[in-house]
């Protein structure tokens, strides 16, 4: 399973765009990138998944360069309710067996 | 749609006691797993199952047992509770056929071992 590295914490203000980058240098050809969000006292929630280029949904965008060794989760115009921990995971073709969550990035959005 | 249901939400045990954390899902998911999350830490995989009758160990299986007699249920048993097992436990499930990384998590069970 590819190891991921992401910043421990980030600070932002309401209305700003937040970009969280994740490094996954040893990603395999069949792996894809998945991001989760976790609020305090809740289980993680799936946000977005991608294989290459750009993926966008109602919550976020995911940018993946051609070499796929990193990915960037983009949250447009964050609000206080976006304060959470964000996890980047690499999922292999064996599925989510032994899916590993790191410590994630703790995002704090201030007024 | 209930999703993934965990019980109990809170539990206090004394060292040496045993107990079972219950997890049930109503989405007919083949894959189910248990994670523990210690304060300020990420989630660590305890055990997982890819279908009824099939279980395997994760990163931190010691002190825990699981079984999967039905598709819906995946209980986690603490054999002899220790203070080091104080944590929040999350159960998760997913469809194997979906070929995505989308796990559905329960709300968690907060366990304190005195």
Image (cartoon, coloured by chain):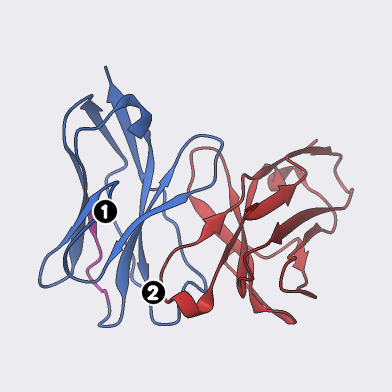
Q: Secondary structure at mark 1?
A: loop
Q: Chain of mark 2?
A: A
Q: In the displayed structure, does residue A41 sit left or right of residue B68?
A: left
**In the depicted structure, whether residue A2 falls above or below residue B75:** below
- Quadrant of residue A41 in the image? top right
Whole-percent x, y for residue B71 in the image: 71, 73
Q: In the displayed structure, does residue A1 sit left or right of residue B50?
A: left
Whole-percent x, y for residue A97 in the image: 52, 74
Whole-percent x, y for residue B107 in the image: 62, 44
Q: Which chain is red?
A: B
Whole-percent x, y for residue B42 in the image: 48, 49
State the residue position of label 2: A1
Residue B10 within the segment the image draws in magenta: no
Q: Chain of mark 1?
A: A
Magenta-colored span? A21-27
Figure disc tally: 2
10 Å crowding of disc 1: few (<14), some (14-19), many (20+): few
State the residue position of label 1: A57
Image quarter of the C terminus of chain B: top right
10 Å crowding of disc 2: few (<14), some (14-19), many (20+): some
Q: Which chain is blue?
A: A
Question: Residue B80 versus residue A45: which sits nearer the camera?
Answer: A45
Q: Secondary structure at mark 2?
A: loop
Marks 1/2: CA–CA distance: 26 Å
């Amino acid at each position: 399973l590819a190891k991921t590295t992401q910043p421990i914490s980030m600070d932002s203000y309401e209305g700003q765009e937040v970009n969280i980058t994740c490094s996954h240098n040893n990603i395999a050809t069949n792996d894809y990138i998945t991001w989760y969000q976790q609020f305090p006292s809740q289980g993680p929630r799936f946000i977005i998944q991608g294989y290459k280029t750009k993926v966008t949904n109602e919550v976020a965008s995911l940018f993946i360069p051609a070499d796929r060794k990193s990915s960037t989760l983009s949250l447009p115009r964050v609000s206080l309710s976006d304060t959470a921990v964000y996890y980047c995971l690499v999922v292999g073709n064996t599925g989510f067996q032994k899916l590993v969550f790191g410590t994630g990035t703790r995002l704090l959005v201030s007024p | 749609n209930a999703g993934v249901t965990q019980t109990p939400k809170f539990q206090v045990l004394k060292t040496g006691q045993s107990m079972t954390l219950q997890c049930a899902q109503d989405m007919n998911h083949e894959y189910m797993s248990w994670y523990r999350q210690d304060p300020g830490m990420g989630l660590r995989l305890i055990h997982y199952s890819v279908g009824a009758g099939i279980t395997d160990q994760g990163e931190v299986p010691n002190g825990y047992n699981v079984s999967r007699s039905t598709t819906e249920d995946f209980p986690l048993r603490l054999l002899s509770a220790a203070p080091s097992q104080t944590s929040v436990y999350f159960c998760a499930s997913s469809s194997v056929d979906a070929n995505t990384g989308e796990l559905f998590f329960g709300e968690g069970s907060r366990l304190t071992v005195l």
